[in-house]
Each structure stands twice: as C-alpha cells, then as structure tokens.
Amino acid sequence: IKLYELRPDEQAAFSRAAAALPDGYSIDAVAEPLSADNIDALAGYEAIVITNKSLLTADIVARLQQLGVRYVSSRCVGFNHIDLPAVKAAGIRVCNTTYPPYGVAEFAIMLMLMALRKCKPAIWRMQVNDYSLEGLLGRELRTMTVGVMGTGHIGRAVIDYLGGFGCKILAYDPYPAQDLAAREGVEYVGLDDLYRDSDLITIHVPLMDSTRNIIDAGAIAKMKDGVVLINVSRGELVDTDALIDAVESEKMGALAMDVFEDEGGIYHENRMNDIISNRKMAYLRQFPNVLLTNHIAFYTDVDVDSMVEDGIANIPAMVEG
Ligand code: NAD
C-alpha cells in the first residue's frame, strides 16, 4: 500500500494504522499527491490511499491499471476527484471514509456563540485598546428559537448539543427522525414555518440540485428581522449575493460561514485565496457581524485520526470483501 499526501498532523495516526494492518500487508507514505510525475514509482504496489488532492483522471486510472493497482481508498468524504466510470471500467475498487459528526457540530455551536456574543468586533477591539461596550450587547442562545435545517448525522449532533442550552429547537428535514420528533424541546415544522419562527438558523443539508441556493433572497425575506445564519455545510446552498443584501440591509443580524461558493464542494487549501479574495467574499468579510472560517469545521484531532486510520484499514477490508 502507498499512502499519498501524508501531512505531519497525520503521522501518529499513520503509524498506529500501519502497525494495526493484518499480516501480509505493508505500507509506506509520501507527502506529495499522486500525479503523472510520480505514478511510475507505484510499480509493485497493489493499493493506494489518497485524498482529494490526488486527481484520478481517466489517464491516471489507465496507468494505475497497467501498474496492477487494484484498490483505492480515499480518506475523505467526496468522490469529486475520482473519475468513477473510469475506475469501474478498470476493475479497480474504490471506497471513501466518513468521520464522526461531533467536530463539525461543535464548530457550528462555536460559530453560533461567537456570532451572538459579537466575538469578532470584541477581539478586534482588544487589539487596539478599545474597551468600549458599545455595539457589543450579546444575546443568549438559551432564550432563542433555533432552526436546524437537515437532521442527518451533523444536524442531529447539533440538536444534541443545543439541548444543553435549553433553547427551543425547530427542525426541518424531508425525512424526519422519529426519535428526534419525540424529543422534548424539538419540533419538526415546514420550511416556511422554520424561516418565520427561528431567531437563528443553522444549515446541515447536503448539496443536491434540489438544495442548491436553498437560502436565496426569497427564503431570507421569510426570515425574522435580525436572523442569525450559520452555514458549515456547503457554500452553494446559499446565494451569496442575497446574503450580501441581507447583511447590508441589516435584515440579517449575523452570518457565520465555514464554506463558500466556488469551492466545488471540497476543501482546497491552495485555491482558498482565489475563493476568498473574489469580490463577494472580500466585501463580506469586512463586516463585524460576518464570521468567515477557512473550511476547518472538520479539522480536529479526532476527525484527522479517523480519516487516516479508516482510510488505511479500508484496504484490507476491501481486499477481504
Ligand atoms: P447527512 O447525509 O447525514 O444528513 C443530511 C440530512 O439532510 C439528511 O437527513 C437529509 O434527509 C436532509 N435533507 C436532504 N434534503 C434536505 C432539504 N431540502 N432540507 C432539509 N434537509 C434535507 O449529512 P451530514 O453528514 O449531516 O452532513 C451535512 C452537510 O455537512 C453536508 O453538506 C456536508 O458536505 C457538510 N460537511 C461540512 C464539513 C466542513 O468541514 N465544513 C464537514 C463535514 C460535512
């Protein structure tokens, strides 16, 4: 097995996972992504572990097939970097990894609290010896109605954590979970009702044709004045122009986003500068009530360890069927 793109923060998990491989398997790692430049070094390997920085184009897949590579484990969630029809035609087996939802859920809760307690201007002011309270009046989550869009893995974890704050929770999901529906303090409602009654809305919906730009000007118009919006899901779920209008007009009280339009659904460290310095984001990030983070909700010790360890363990799992 060869693992590509090993980062220093993954080294400990790599060593643990390597030691846990069954007899007959061996693994080594390189820091670079797999590419046409280094693919010939794969001679003699049967399996690779990659992330979304290794682009498995049809050409690369054809070369993998010639070299006898039969298993690809992608240690991230999406498959956008892999030409799946080419891989299938080449008889190469592929799998991805998922990771626990708690890191992302905690991040969403953190953004809620930071937005409600005006942490961005508060931290700025400390840097310049401005100790005034003006404009920093916070709001308490406990007193609010929070709308959770999407009650899958992450939405459910967010609801679990919100339970500790004692706020009222409205949920929307085309497939409501029976156990959540029965929970005190949680009520499934229609989307329009969620928009109308929520003081804060947090989005945990996957990106699909039906959810692209689900938060557009029409949706925002249905929300409460001063609504707080949190998006740690996918940038394309929101219409960024509509968000700019809502922040400028103060219809939206605060906005926190970890994900951006044009990311293509995946995190690319080297593309972030283009994404953030585009006209819209460069404008939005100036507002004291707009918090932007660099697609890091998933980036915790637990999640990194889990992606590396599961990504490696998936190779013998695939081999053994
Ligand atoms: P999931 O598939 O477990 O849950 C998604 C839920 O959304 C499902 O219950 C589904 O029924 C529901 N849903 C579908 N269409 C809907 C709609 N129109 N309105 C409301 N709900 C709808 O997914 P998850 O693991 O909870 O992930 C949620 C999102 O978080 C994904 O978009 C994922 O890409 C994103 N994510 C972001 C990060 C990050 O680092 N920022 C990390 C992991 C995941």
Image (tube, grey):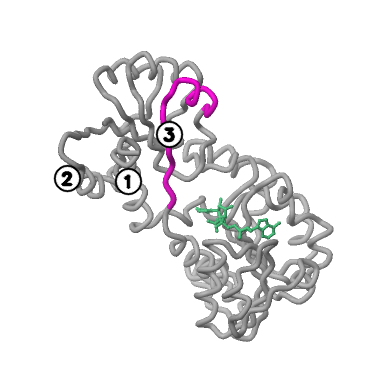
The first of marks 1 and 3 along the sequence is 3
View quadrant of ligand 1:
bottom right
Out of 144 and 139, give the one closest to the viewer: 144
> What is the number of the mark on residue 308?
1
What residue did someone put label 2 on? 19
Under mark 1, the amino acid is Val
Under mark 3, the amino acid is Val
Above or below — where is 40 with respect to 135? above
Whole-number angstrom distance, CA of label 2 to CA of label 3 = 23 Å
Under mark 2, the amino acid is Ala
Determine whether the residue tagged by mark 3 lies in a helix, strand or loop: strand
* Mark in the foreground, 2 or 3: 3
Q: Residue at x 72, y 75 (%)?
A: 198
Determine whether the residue tagged by mark 2 lies in a helix, strand or loop: helix
Q: Is residue 96 magenta?
A: yes
Out of 178 and 262, give the one closest to the viewer: 178
Please state the extent of the stretch shown in magenta in the rendering: 83-98
Q: Quadrant of the C terminus?
A: top left
Whole-number angstrom distance, CA of label 2 to CA of label 1 = 13 Å
Within 10 angstroms of label 2, few (less than 14), some, or many (20 or more) residues?
few
Determine whether the residue tagged by mark 1 lies in a helix, strand or loop: helix
Query: In the picture, residue 248 is in which quadrant?
Result: bottom right
Above or below — where is 36 with respect to 319? above
Q: Position of residue 270 (x, y in %)?
A: 48, 36
* Mark in the foreground, 2 or 1: 2
What residue did someone put label 3 on? 94
